[in-house]
Image (cartoon, helix red, strand yellow):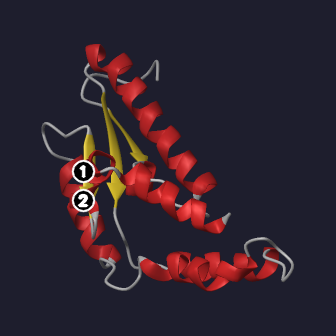
């Protein structure tokens, strides 16, 4: 960063997953949440020098992520696991974002335009489900998540 000049940009590739945690996705979502916090800290630290820090938070994007997650479930979730009864729900969650996912080219074009704008926004969101992000926590989401977790006990 010492060689960066005013007008330079740091772009971090995050996810809307950093805003909302769901069961069986905690580790992944924790990394995205940490990146969101890191981006905020860098932006505040570097803005006096004219350096822009931009966090890209795409929503559901067409990918093979769900397939890979399902393969991981097959490898690690044993028949005698306490969570074996909800294997179907875990598969469903892993693939849920692909039902009406946004094509990658659309997200890439949108993010490119947003990141290269004269005055870029601090957070760039694109793709399915991003409009819901600001209100997830405001709509008592934690209670719904806790209720689901209680049903696993």
At x 24% / y 59%, what residue is drawn?
A: 132
Q: Is residue 134 visible?
A: yes
CB of mark 1 within 8 Å of CB of mark 2? Answer: yes
Label 1 sits on residue: 135
Q: Quadrant of residue 45?
A: top left
Farthest left residue in view: 118
Helix, strand or loop at mark 1: helix
Q: In the displayed structure, would residue 68 be above or below residue 152?
A: below
Where does the C terminus fall, quadrant-wise?
bottom right
User: For mark 2, what is the residue?
Assistant: 132
Expressed as whole percent of the image width and height from the top left, the position of residue 139 reads 27, 51
Q: Can see residue 15?
A: no
The answer to which quarter of the image holds residue 133 is: bottom left
Name which residue lies at 63% across and 75% down: 69
Front in this rendered view, residue 63 or 10: 63
Eyeballing the image, is 14 above or below 79? above
Q: Compared with residue 55, is residue 72 higher up or lower down, i.e. above or below?
A: below
Q: Residues within 10 Å of mark 1 (few under 14, many from 20)?
A: few
- The quadrant in which residue 123 appears is top left
Q: From mark 1 to mark 2, how far is it between C-alphas?
A: 6 Å
Q: Residue at x 64, y 67 (%)?
A: 152
Residue 104 as seen in the image, left or right of residue 68: left
Q: Secondary structure at mark 2?
A: helix
Q: Position of residue 151 (x, y in %)?
A: 59, 67
Q: With 49 as the anchor, is 93 left or right in this view?
A: right
Q: Is residue 147 left or right of residue 50?
A: right
Q: Is residue 151 left or right of residue 147?
A: right
Q: Is residue 32 above or below residue 127?
A: above
Residue closer to the observer: 152 or 23: 152
């Amino acid at each position: 960063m010492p060689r960066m000049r005013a007008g330079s940009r740091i772009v971090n590739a995050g996810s809307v997953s950093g805003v909302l945690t769901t069961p069986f996705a905690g580790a992944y979502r924790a990394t995205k949440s940490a990146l969101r916090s890191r981006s905020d800290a860098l932006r505040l630290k570097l803005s006096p020098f004219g350096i822009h820090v931009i966090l890209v938070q795409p929503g559901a994007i067409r990918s093979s992520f769900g397939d890979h997650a399902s393969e991981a479930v097959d490898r690690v979730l044993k028949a005698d696991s306490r969570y074996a009864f909800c294997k179907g729900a875990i598969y469903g969650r892993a693939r849920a974002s692909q039902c009406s996912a946004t094509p990658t080219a659309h997200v890439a074009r949108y993010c490119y335009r947003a990141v290269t704008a004269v005055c870029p926004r601090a957070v760039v969101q694109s793709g399915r489900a991003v409009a819901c992000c600001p209100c997830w926590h405001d709509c008592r989401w934690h209670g719904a998540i806790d209720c689901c977790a209680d049903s696993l006990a």
